Image (cartoon, coloured by chain):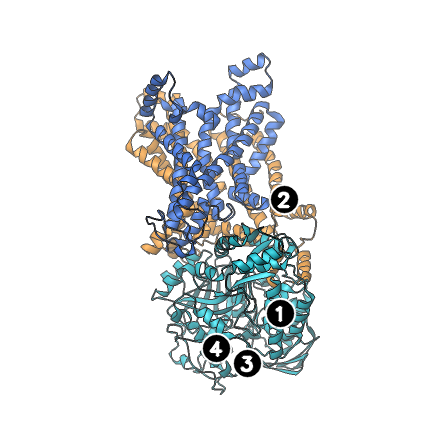
Amino acid sequence: MTGYIVRRVLSMIPVALLVTIALFVLIRLTPGDPVRVILGQEATPQNVKALRHELGLDESYPVQYVKWLGRLAHLDFGRSLASREPVRKAIGERLPATLELGLTGFAVGLIFAIILGTVAAVWRDSVWSRLTTAFSLVFVSLPNFVLGVLLILLFALHWRIFSPGGYVAFSRAPAQNLRYLVLPASVGAVTGAATLSRFVRSSLLEALYTDYIRTARAKGLREFVVVARHAMRNALLPVLTLAGLALGGLWEGAVITETIFTWPGVGRLTVDALGRRDYPIVQAVVLIAAFSYMIANLLVDIAYAYLDPRISYGRR
Amino acid sequence: MSGYDSNNYWQRLAASRVNRRRALGGGAAATSLMALALAGCGSSNNNGGKNNNSGSNPPPSTATSSGGATTAAGTPSGSPAAPPTAQSINAGSPTAAASKVKTGGTMTFGTSRDVTNLDSGKSQDVYSAWVQAQIVEPLFIGTNDFKIAGNTIDKVENPDNTTYLFHLHPGIKYQDGTDFNADSVKWNLQRHIDDKTSVRTADVKPITAMESVDANTLKITVSAPYAPFLSKLTGGAGAMYSQAAFQKLGANLPNDLTAAGSGPFKFTNWDHGNQVVLDKNPAYWRKDANGIQYPYMDKFVFKNIPDENTRLANLRTGDNDWIDTPPPKDIKSILSNPDLVYKQVPGLSFSFVMMETEKDPFQDKRVRQALSYAIDRQTIVDTVYFGTQVVADTEIPGSLFGSVQGPYLKQDIAKAKDLLKQAGKDTVAFSAQYSNAAPVIQQTFELMKDQISPAGFNMSLQPIEFATLVDNGNKGAYQAGGLGWSGAVDPDGFCYQLFHTGAGFNLAHISDPNLDALMDKGQQTLDVGARTEIYKQVMQTLIDLQPFIIYSWGVYQQTTRKNVQNYQIGPSIWPLMHMVWKS
Amino acid sequence: MVAGERLVPIPSALGESALAARRKHSLSRFIVNHRVLSAFIVIFVALVLVAVFADALATYNPTKTAPTIKMRSPSGAHWLGTDYLGRDMYSRVIKGAQVSMRVAVIAVSISLVVGVVMGLMAGYFGGLADLLCGRYVDAQLAFPGILLAIAIVNALGPGLYHAMIAVGILGVPLYFRLTRGQVLQAKEQEYVRAAEVIGASRWRIMFRHILPNIANPLVVAASLAGGNAILALAALSFLGIAAQPPTPDWGAMINIGKDYLHNNMWMAIGPGAAIFLTVFTYYMLGDALRDYLDPRLKTR
């Protein structure tokens, strides 16, 4: 097992390098000059030259890349080109908001997904199954920005139950924070429930047709026990995989939700930074997202190796 | 307001389709700048206090009331915006408004963009400037009638054309307790001279020497007469920092202005992407006529809400008191909402189509002129802006001296075709780039595409990111493009940086020796009458060359809840925020 | 989609041959047995027809502006009202079907071709091919998808076709993993062993023997991926970097329409309903196809 983990971790190194190179090249392929954006309309050519030098953008790409990697080795993400704020601080400030929104939406979505998916699989041909399937297909087919806008229109403008958008830190005003949280978290929860419930359904269906379930049924176990104790345990493994991966790429959906609901999280920071060509911030965020995805992947694989003895991890 | 045709400008604004009485209420606000601004100082010039516009019930206004009040406010007639003898707003009369003022409370202002950098030497965006103006006050302000007035400067003397004597308002202290004095101003200006990465180097470039005559008098010598000089000190280079605080903040300055300036509000915190919170500076140096300490508000919050509909929704629900630019399409519904107030006055900006004049097809000025004739500006303003902009075809707005009207205001397809024929073309195909983050520009170009096609223009649209657009513009990697420009309270700010050979934002890459000479002369001439004539010639040259096609002038818009009182509309809104209160 | 036509009887393709009677019989039986599948095949074909005959179905020129009649509610003259420049929303929505169909076909083809070829090679050859492809896909999956798409589109220059390429690239890992997994299973099957024994070339085995036998899950995935592609492109349009105006693209129409929900909600409702219906159809079709093609799930 230890050997497997070591091999698995070592195999991440080339992937990580590939990610850093692709990221670095892709961002610099994108036309647009951060210095021009920072200096604005009154800039003189001398200003542009001086600032480009100060920010180290006049060096060749390979040199910039190597310097960046060197700093990364010390976990130093550099400073934002625009605000000169340390990138680590910029992201650190926004992370709680993104995590709060993302995790709430995700957790609620996962719970609903399991309930709906189970209903759809167990009572396969019932009206309930059709309804839950319809629910998931309807909301999977609905772009999340349309859903967000609809929620604002109904709950904030028409009925005035919630605020149309905004944020205060939970530590500062918990009640107010939750009031702001409900609508954007609902978007995440509904989308998550719709997506994941389909996988719960299909993997539970698959599990229900395996031999050991037939054996369990043949032994005369009650259907509830069969589903809850036997099928569910196996069915949830792939679901948790997917959930783990979804968690790794959590902030992705946040890009649009955060924009609509003016939630000051990492997603919006990235889109803003990309628009300003604030390379250090974009690079740091993407890298963190990529690494968290890779680590989630690793943990899922390790969990698999522990949980499912049928999977062997010898050399291929 | 002599020397140029302001009537035409106002008529065009009045012709806009917005409810005129309410929308133009701000016109009167412009007149009362002096009266309001003077409240704190109690000297006895009574000319200015003509009316007080407290926001909720603007009186009807006309062009003459605006012009008249301007003259009454103390500037010698015939020399509007005379830079060498800028009047201080500190020499004026009390206003009656103060008696019913309610102090305290929090003002929440919804902005469309977050602050980028709090160091005025490193940022140029208005959102950063708005916050800076509250903390690090500028030396001068642009008044609502587009002149320069002293803010922390009482008087400016010009012993000769290249010497300025700044008489500072005595007794002002920075928030860290250090003195605002001649040495401090000198240090502030020097930092932009020394720091080559400062975006303000161009503003202070003419300075050759500075000398503290006494604690409150600074003598500045410039290399050659430079008319726009004081207008450059209304923000940015004119924002004054305490040297001690500046050095203490060090590398944090872009993100932290704690005790940095002498302004009415103190920096509390900047929650990036979310809000900037400012608290009242209880030791601010201004009091109103009744002795009440400025600022009236306890707290000022700039809340960043990028989505315009969410922003407006926040205003409707009362989560915000005041918002940045409202969506043009919603102005009608804002005007009909009894809880909300909308006002607009002529602004200092324009929207334009730029053309790369070094490349086909726009090398030939006749093609550029043809395109300009082919555009139906009125329909664009009516359809896309819902009448909230001013139809225009030249750079310098009507409210500034030097403004003229060109021949392109009315669409003329026949003339466009004729010019194309002269240029030896039947049809011209080109692509136009514009920022994909600007829906109104996109709509403008979609409309324009149909408008110009009968003349033989086949335009394809290329929405791209703003950063790419500016980059392409600088490199000349485009044929035509759409952008906006906001200038300063000086006609120089509407042409030099855009059209002078080699200037920093000459995206059209136009180079015309005659035009260069005219703009140089405009900078070096101090007499306003003479400058007016020079800039008229500049405009005539640009009308002929048409490197940019101007299609509208912008307006200052303010959208507030009804209880927001006593704010300015125009260039002076941000430096005079200390007088705002909530009923 | 070629494989799909072979597997799924499309009603209109059936007809006048001598076997017509028998076919008719089997067709009606098919419809009765697979009501959901049949219904969504019909809807899907209808969508394709709308896209093909969009120009004939449009009542106005979808890009012609008419400022004097902007933002009108639905009426007899304009069935879905008009947009902010007075363009007929019904015609734009209809014409948008063409755009979205192109997106689905082109983007999915890119993902399908690249993903399947990579998956076949990685699965069948193993070794270095598997390592390289696997690492590439790992790296791509590690990238946040929407940001990768934005970066690709910006690097290529915004525009509909570049956006389709970006969306196509986003879908590659799905097909890669699916194909590779299937190939690994198929490799152990007897028909592959038999082909190897008689000396068939490895490419021939991959494309002539293995590929047809793993086509079913790919068809299902293609249908689901069509929906994904349309949604992904809508997200790019929402961020303003996909279709070039005035091309009537549903995502772009919703993007602007969402700003006008208070003023004229029809500007968002028309394209919103269209995109929803289309994506829904793709997903339902995929779901129904899976149930139909997967014999294990068909029992009971």
Label 1 resides on the chain identified as B
Name the spot of residue B48 as percent of width and height, x first.
47, 83
- Compare marks 3 and 1 and give the one earlier in the sequence: 3
Q: Amino acid at mark 1?
A: Val
Task: Give the labeled residue for mark 2.
Answer: A25
Chain with colour orange in the figure: A
**Tag in front: 4 or 3:** 4
- CA distance for labels 3 and 1: 30 Å
> Is B415 on the left-hand or right-hand side of A198?
right
Q: Colour of chain B?
A: cyan
Residue contact between numbered discs 1 and 2, judged by CB atoms under 8 Å: no
Name the spot of residue B392 as percent of width and height, x first.
52, 66
Between residue A197 and residue C81, name the one nearer to us: C81
- CA distance for labels 1 and 4: 30 Å
Label 3 resides on the chain identified as B
Task: Give the labeled residue for mark 1.
Answer: B538
Q: Give the residue at the far left of this rendering.
A: A127
Same-chain check, marks 2 and 4 = no
User: Can I make out residue A277 in this image?
Assistant: no
Q: Amino acid at mark 4?
A: Leu
Task: Give the labeled residue for mark 3.
Answer: B88
Q: Secondary structure at mark 1?
A: helix
Q: Which of the numbered marks, if any, corresponds to residue B33?
A: 4
